[in-house]
Amino acid sequence: MWYHIAPEVGKRVALALYQEMRYTPVAPTLRCVVDLDADPGSLATLRGMVAADELPSAKKIQAMQRILADRSAALPLRTLAIQYLTGPEMRDPKVRLSVVQQFGPIASDPTRPHDQRMEALEFVKSAYDAFSKDSEVNDQILSIVADRMADPDQELRSSAVQFLGPKLVGFAKKGTLDRIHFSDRESVIRYLEKDAAGSGDDSPQARSILQALKQ
């Protein structure tokens, strides 16, 4: 993935490749391209991630957590870290919980800059484990995201609605609602009524969630 990098002759870039482990050899795939001219420190961080990949599991997790917590690290490197910590192969709920505990408060803090809150909310959502839907970690994620449906920041509300919409329809609706703890259910309903009455892309999902909450 190229992160806002124009493929120009003479530009210095670093390539991050991923070697998938299979019974038969396969060619490595390109995961990201880092612009070394725009961010000279990226190469050192990238080398650190490559070294971390050779570490035992516990140390590897700690290394990825440090990269994720470092807001000065290049975006593609932090993206690789969150993908490792919350990907389908990560079966340790404590690792996912650490992501939720670190970024949930940031997503919920209205004094934080908008971009920090959006990033934190995306990280929290990424920690949701679709293979363990009834886990306590997932319950925390659902509750954190649900509260953002009453956020004054419209973009955060939209992100929350789009995440929860598919989980609050059909057969999954009742079970999912029972697992959500709303800090202020009435405020969520008021904002959903506002968004449902609009013409935004997420208005239909806002109407569906509102209907589910009022039943």
Image (tube, rainbow, N blue to C red):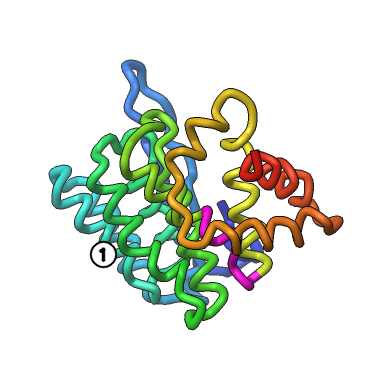
Residue nearer the viewer, 169 or 79: 169
Pinpoint residue 177: horizontal percent, then vertical percent: 51, 39
- Give me the residue at 37% from left, 50% from top: 140
Does dot 1 land on a helix, a strand or a loop? helix
Does 148 lie within the magenta span? yes
For residue 129, side relative to residue 209 (left or right): left
Residue nearer the viewer, 182 or 53: 182
Which amino acid type is marked by label 1? Arg
Pinpoint residue 61: horizontal percent, then vertical percent: 22, 51
Residue 109 lies, with reference to residue 18, above or below; the image says below
What residue would you read off at disc 1?
Answer: 66
Residue 15 lies, with reference to residue 6, above or below; the image says above
Residue nearer the viewer, 109 or 98: 109
- Give me the residue at 58% from left, 69% from top: 10
Q: Is residue 33 visible?
A: no
Span colored in magenta: 146-153
Q: Residues within 10 Å of mark 1 (few under 14, many from 20)?
A: some
Q: Main secondary structure of the magenta part?
A: helix
